[in-house]
């Protein structure tokens, strides 16, 4: 049973790495609005750019920090060690948001990037001031907010996607608790920050 729990925990922790969630959000926008984005080559190019700015460069920075022994583990469990990765991620997320905002490619994708940026910096501030917030559940709360906010704009029935997102969000939190990566308080706070950050972004964009 313990082995099954660990497999479950690692599976959801890896598949739903927080840095991958902006890409998943962009894929949701493209999938639910195919007629608004008919150019497949442009869509792929856009996803690659988001992947590079919100996942590859921040992840590479973490790997580099580990190689230089600034952090002890790649999952950065120590609260103090999270400071530099947060700053690096925040820089790349601001970069991604500014690029897509100026290009006017899609307001919904810019909203996702803005919500992600807000969530990163709120997590960063709380990490400095008090406790280690779960980045995984922050992303999970953000996923639910994204689907809820963009559901009315979907040209297909996205109800099953919302249900699947809520189930996955629950599994993500459970996975982090099973692995002992966070306390319940840290996990629940992550959900709240993620959901709230994207709602603030939606209000700013009037989505």
Image (cartoon, grey):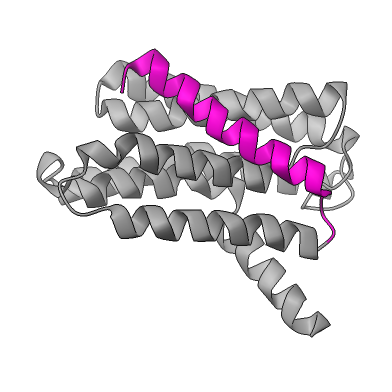
Q: Between residues 67 and 3, which one lies in front from this camera angle?
A: 3
Q: Is residue 203 left or right of residue 168?
A: left
Q: Between residues 145 and 93, which one lies in front from this camera angle?
A: 145
Q: Tell me the quadrant of the picture where the C terminus can be found.
A: top left
Question: Which residue: 67% across, 23% down?
Answer: 122
Q: In the rendered image, which quarter is residue 14 located in?
A: bottom right
Question: Which residue: 42% across, 32% down?
Answer: 112
Residue 108 is inside the magenta segment = no
Q: Tell me the quadrant of the picture where the N terminus can be found.
A: bottom right
Residue 194 is inside the magenta segment = yes
Q: Between residues 144 and 89, which one lies in front from this camera angle?
A: 144
Q: Chief secondary structure of the magenta span?
A: helix
Could you say where residue 175 lies in the image, as x and y percent from the top left? 70, 62
Question: Which residue: 60% across, 29% down?
Answer: 119
Q: In the rendered image, which quarter is residue 152 located in?
A: top left
Vertical arrangement, residue 192 with respect to residue 30, above or below: above
The answer to whether residue 26 is seen in the rendering is yes
Q: Is residue 188 left or right of residue 1?
A: left
Could you say where residue 18 lies in the image, as x and y percent from the top left? 60, 46
Q: Between residues 161 and 110, which one lies in front from this camera angle?
A: 161
- Count up the numbered dots: 0
Question: Which region of the structure is painted magenta?
Answer: 180-207
Vertical arrangement, residue 172 with respect to residue 103, above or below: below
The answer to whether residue 49 is seen in the rendering is no
Could you say where residue 141 lies in the image, as x and y percent from the top left? 56, 42
């Amino acid at each position: 049973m313990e082995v099954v729990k660990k497999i479950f925990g690692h599976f959801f922790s890896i598949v739903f790495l927080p840095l991958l969630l902006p890409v998943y959000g962009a894929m949701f926008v493209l999938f639910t609005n195919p007629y608004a984005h008919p150019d497949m080559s442009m869509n792929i190019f856009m996803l690659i750019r988001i992947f590079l700015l919100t996942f590859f460069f921040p992840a590479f920075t973490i790997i580099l920090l580990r190689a230089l022994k600034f952090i002890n583990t790649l999952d950065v469990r120590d609260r103090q060690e999270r400071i530099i990765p947060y700053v690096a991620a925040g820089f790349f997320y601001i970069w991604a948001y500014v690029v897509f905002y100026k290009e006017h490619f899609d307001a919904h994708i810019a909203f996702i990037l803005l919500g992600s940026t807000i969530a990163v910096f709120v997590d960063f501030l709380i990490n400095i001031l008090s406790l280690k917030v779960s980045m995984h559940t922050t992303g999970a709360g953000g996923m639910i907010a994204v689907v809820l906010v963009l559901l009315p704009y979907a040209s297909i029935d996205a109800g099953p996607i919302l249900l699947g997102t809520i189930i996955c969000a629950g599994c993500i939190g459970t996975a982090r608790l099973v692995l002992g990566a966070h306390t319940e308080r840290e996990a629940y706070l992550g959900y709240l920050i993620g959901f709230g950050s994207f709602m603030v972004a939606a209000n700013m964009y009037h989505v």
